[in-house]
Amino acid sequence: MSSFEAQEASLKRMLWVGAIGAGLAALAGMFGVHDGSVWRMPAALEARVQSALEAAGLGGVDVAMDGQRALLRGVVPDQASLALASETALHAAGLGGPWAGGVTHVDAADLSVGEVARPFAWSVSRQGERLILSGAAPSDAARAELLAVAATQFPNAEIVDQMRTAGGAPAPNWRAMAGNVIRAVAYLQQGEGRITDREIAIIGDGPYDAVRRIRTDYAAAPAPFRARVAASVDGLDIVYPELQGLDLRDAEPNACAQAFTRLLDGARVTFDAGSPALSAQGRASLESIISVALRCDRNRLTVLGPAEGGAELSRARASNVLAALSAAGVMPGRLQAAAGSGRTLAIAVDAVEAQP
């Protein structure tokens, strides 16, 4: 082989190596482990769109990605919010559009103007052989998904859908959290789960391993949610020793009244001097009261403020405690506030007559 032929063969080998290298680089770019790869891009774009919508005050809009096409679903309060949602999603990852990368198109056909729920409240409850889902869901798709989760977790139950579609969900991961709450309730022998805005409450009774697992799973709920587990083990409260001997599974009024009395005698809920605002100690003491109120709000609960400072201050303090209970997921329709006559905060419990 002549020197010229050898050089030509070497050049061809270099061209082939370069072509193969470029091909491998292209494949790595398309399928490698990074957010720009074909298989990870939709998930990365979905997270970007969700974050952008949340920053724009539209965190309750459901987002799904079809490749680089964003599908928006749910309810917003007005026409301006419709336009804002589409624009925000399109520009969530760069300029947007077919030639700019990122989100190439936004489909908002399933996004509509309608009711916005305040607070955004939802629940799942086991009642004998029935599982009842009620309250607000952010979209028809979310509603259908939660019904599917319920059917999987409770295959022998009658699933009752009392949900409605409404705007106002507090975060893009609301749907995932609601599904997890259904799964948590499935561990219990009886109980329910509630999400009120960003507050999650798991309420009920079950075996020790099940309750321990739920407490572990919800020890640190994903942001922006906060979770409380008000669950007993075969009727025994394993968190608050003051409640030993009291069985709150049936929310019997006398047992609930005793529970409140024991807790309020042991850790008084206090207020800033001359003010209706809870003190730091009072806010901490309120956690145990919330736990009992979540289990006992089948009854009517009347929060009675301490008498010190007069009736107006007493009623204002009771109203602040009521607001804290309601925000934590205690049913607001079962709460009322009144001026009290005692030295400390008290909670009266009265049975609610069953509806015919």
Image (cartoon, helix red, strand yellow):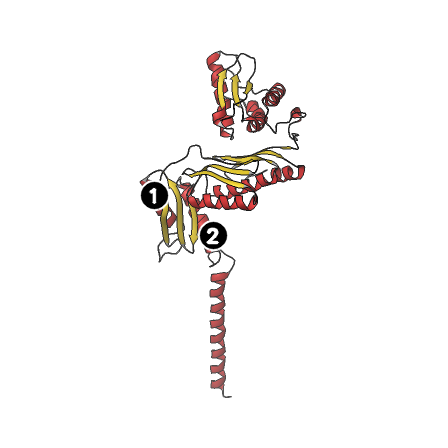
Residue 348: quarter of image:
top right
Type of residue at label 2?
Ala
Q: Residue at x 46, y 40 (%)?
A: 171
Q: Which residue is mark 1?
A: 82
Q: Is residue 286 left or right of residue 118?
A: right
Label 2, residues with CA under 10 Å away: few <14, some 14-19, many ≥20: some
Q: Residue at x 49, y 29 (%)?
A: 327
| Res 32 seen here | yes
- Residue at the farthest front position: 356
Q: Residue at x 36, y 48 (%)?
A: 108
Residue 332: image tag: none
Give residue 215's position: percent from left, percent from top: 61, 37
Secondary element at tag 1? helix
Secondary element at tag 2? helix
Residue 51: quarter of image:
top left
Q: Is residue 288 above or below residue 316?
A: below
Give residue 298's position: percent from left, percent from top: 54, 27
Q: Which residue is mark 2?
A: 43
- Residue at the farthest left position: 79
